Image: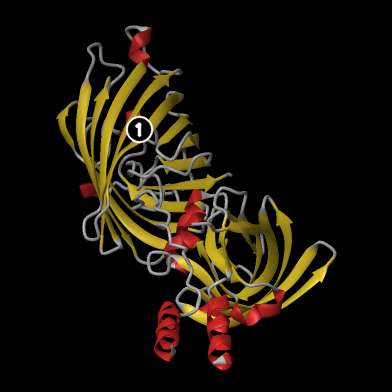
Amino acid sequence: MKRVLSYIFLFSSLLLATEYHVDKDAKNSVIFISNAPVEQIIGKTENIDGYVLWQGRDKLENSEFYFEVDLASFDTGIGLRNRHMRENYLETEKYPYATFTGKLIKAESVKDTISVTASGVFELHGIKNPVEIDVSIVEANGGYFAKSRFEVRLEDYNIERPKMMLLKIGEIIRIELSFFVKEFKE
Amino acid sequence: MKKAVFLLLFILLAHGYPQSNWKQGKPVQHDLQLFHSMTVALLPTAETLQKGDVEFEVSHRFHTPVNSANSFFGLDGPANIRLALGYAVSNSLFLNVGRTNVFDNTEFQIRYKALQLKNDFFPVLMTLQGGVAYNSQVTQSISNNSKKYQYYGQVVVNTLIFQKVGLGIVPTYLQNAHIFCKEYQHSFTLGNYIQYYASERWSIFFEWNPTISGWRQYYNTVTIGFELETGGHFFKILLTNNDKVNSAQFHAGSDMDFLNGEWRIGFTITRLLR
């Protein structure tokens, strides 16, 4: 009987995870930076969305997250270049989103900042690869503010390297994220 | 009691692990874009630029035909030149000012993207374009100053089939087609073109601008050429029987016969400056 009750308690506790959604009204930012022979190409968007299920640092195994970025929303500053990026390289009609889904596997507090490691699958251009990235989180605006940066190799996602003035851009693209999440309340 | 406990467990399990209440939104939709550049040879496409983009243009049309002796295919000159600067006020509205050395013709042009019909097989883009040109340095006497002004209006309709073949039709009305005529002459042309995108960088095009009614210099204009784009630049190299580069002069027809091999070399380079 006691065992049964403890199982009930365990299962019910799983349903008590706090859910956070990306705050779409906040000033979110996703930037990619690519080094080309003639210039540096920077693309920006505010279009990040997703959620985190979180039960605290002690129950990371129950955590879950999903984030997506609308690739057609990136702006490199030149409309024609945006179009080339969408149509020829990222093929956003077929693969509209870059997504990252997984769990938090490590969380440490240093003063007011929580450093977490997010582990999961990053999908881009129809290709999925396992990825781990470090994220720093602080409390802000009644929720949390998350920042991270990581690198993507175009070849790993079957993306042809675009050319600028007939010369190819760099193989590695740097990604910088900063976004706000707030607790979801029904 | 046991049944109640198992029933409760079943209900809890049926909900599974915590499920998110997040719902995916709709992806961003972009304006329809068919052709890659704003013009084919000289006829406009229905494209506009992104708000804030600035476009610079330099064009040459060598006056001497390629089959002339001792002229290095006409490249020794002289040449009719055009310099132009355009600005995208919004994603649908584009303003352009251009000047040519032929009668020092300066034209102001406005382009507005009016209609887009998205369709997998036959998308349609329609743009309205109009302009006013002023010829400040005329070589013959002219009846009055108002005869130095020319006006034109165009409807540009484009489609793109198989993602590679751009087709366009450009009915154009030109007022005061021949500025040295005492009476005002008009021209109505039905320009049309096809542009084949062989790759993301290279394309070839054919442009025909027949005069349907009104005044025409001597011959209809025919142009063939190819285009190279490098992400910000467009380079067009062409052969044409018409050596004019500003729209108000171009639509008045050509002085040379393409059927007689009287072709001129020309080029146009555009660059997005933002």
> Which residue lies at the image location 39% right of the left edge and 67% below the top edge?
B199
- Residue A81 vs A155, above or below: the answer is above
Q: Is residue B217 above or below residue B193?
A: above
Q: Count up the numbered dots.
A: 1
Question: Who's the residue at 30% across and 63% down the image?
Answer: B163
User: In the rendered view, how is the structure colored?
Assistant: secondary structure
Q: Position of residue A108 (x, y in %)?
A: 78, 74
Expressed as whole percent of the image width and height from the top left, the position of residue A12 reads: 53, 77
Asked if residue A166 shows in the view, the reply is no
Residue picked out by circle 1: B247
Q: Nearer the viewer, residue A37 or B1?
A: B1
- Furthest residue in direction top, as rendered: B144
Rendered residue at 56%/48% (across/down): A25
**Residue A59 position by quadrant:** bottom right
Towards the viewer: B153 or B185: B153
In the rendering, at what x and y percent does residue B207 appear?
27, 48
Q: Farthest residue in the front direction?
A: B1
Single out the residue that lies furthest toward the right: A111
* Amino acid, disc 1: Ser
Q: Quadrant of the C terminus of chain B?
A: top right
In the image, is A57 to the left or to the right of B232? right
Question: For residue A95, which quarter of the picture?
Answer: bottom left
Residue at 34%, 41% in the rendered image:
B44
In the displayed structure image, the side of residue A60 where residue A124 appears, left or right: left
Q: Quadrant of the rendered structure where residue A105 is?
A: bottom right
